Image: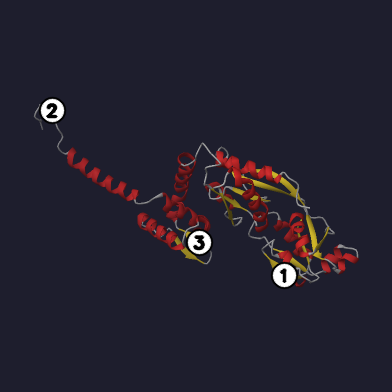
Amino acid sequence: MAGRHGLNVDRSWRPMHKAANKGGGRAMLKLADVGLSELQAFEAVYRCRSVIEASRVLDLPQPTVSRWLAKLRDHFGDALFVRTPRGMEPTGTADAIIGPVRDMLRIYRDRLMQDRSFDPRSTNRNFRIAASDFGQLTVLPMLDRWSADQAPRARFSSVAVDRHSLAAGLESGEIDIAFGGFPALYSGVIEQTLYEDVYVCVMRRGHPLLDRDFTVEAFRDATHVLVSARTAGHIHHEVEARITAMVSPENVRLTSNSFLVAPLLLGQTDMILTVPRRVALIFKAQVDLEIMSPPFDLPQFKVKQYWHERSRHDPGHQWLRQGIAELMAGRPPS
């Protein structure tokens, strides 16, 4: 059909174009309804297999995470997760979208939000550090004193150690630094040795074993307080396994998952405790303990800080890990 100026105009193109615009508009509006917060909640639930654990990791109220997850379920038209005895298991749709979601979050954190200029004196950044309770006691007070003048508004938060989520937390940026001895982190994680430590046995002053030879047989016959670190994934798990292989179950009288609580459980008992030397030295005077070398070989281990490759060039992160390295370069307590 000819137009006013003799041009051939395909009138059928206009309605199709309009319909395409309308459909595209709806898609764009629907996509705009899903924000990075909802995607971050989805990624955390996928990784933790739990809404409760995801809310703890994100430091958000559980109802907020549940509401965001419901919004995503509506958006994708899929349950995304189903409850099972093992936790929240992802559906096929969740498995299909987790890769792109993580890519989007990584681009946002690495390319859009990363501050290339870092001023310690003005920053109010919250640095998240994964460590055992003893690791927290070691590094957090030091960081507070060190940063008081040069970074008075900086904050430092502890993150619970879990071998199932540690590497993913470093990769996602939800953990800035992991502090401790973790032998099973994958190649994308960079590590730096801070100091070396050894295991010792501690017992109350006046313990009967102090007046006799501390042999392997004496260790086996003694009653024990045991620190259990099976969920943490760090080097202590090897020591725990060695002790439980040597000592009969009835001789393990008390078990704690805390390095800080375990020495306090010795009290006036005749139990003994096997812990890193730094732990023993902190509690030696406070709880009136004696320290002895174990009567068998236990691994000497390296305490390290770990970070992901994605954080290598982040100026704030460089400031943090350099500070930790300098602080840990000092001598251990004596």
Left or right: 315 in relation to 70: right
Closer to the chain start, of discs 2 and 1, is 2
Q: Nearer the viewer, residue 323 or 57?
A: 323
Amino acid type of the residue tagged 3 in the rendering: Ser
Q: Which mark is residue 254?
A: 1
Residue type, mark 2 in image? Leu
User: Which secondary structure, mark 2?
Assistant: loop
Does label 3 or label 1 sit earlier along the sequence? Answer: 3
Graded by Cα atoms within 10 Å as few (under 14), some (14 to 19) or many (20 or more), the crowding at tag 2 reads: few
Question: Which secondary structure lies at badge 3?
Answer: loop
Q: Position of residue 130 (x, y in %)?
A: 60, 53
Which quadrant would residue 64 be assigned to in this image?
Answer: bottom left
Q: Is residue 289 above or below residue 21?
A: below
Seen in the picture, residue 236 relative to 222 is either above or below; the reply is: above
How many angstroms separate mark 2 from mark 1 (CA)? 92 Å
334 vs 233, nearest the viewer: 334
- Tag 1 secondary structure: strand
Of circles 2 and 3, which is in front?
A: 3
**In the figure, is residue 127 to the left or right of 29?**
right
* Residue at the farthest top position: 6
Which residue does the image show at 64% across and 43% down from the upper left? 323
The coloring applied to the image is secondary structure
Percent across and percent down for residue 150 are 59, 42
- Mark 3 surroundings within 10 Å by alpha-carbon count, few (fewer than 14), some (14 through 19), many (20 or more): some
Q: Which residue is mark 2?
A: 7
Identify the residue position indicated by label 3 in the image.
50
Looking at marks 2 and 3 on the same chain, the residue that comes earlier in the sequence is marked by 2
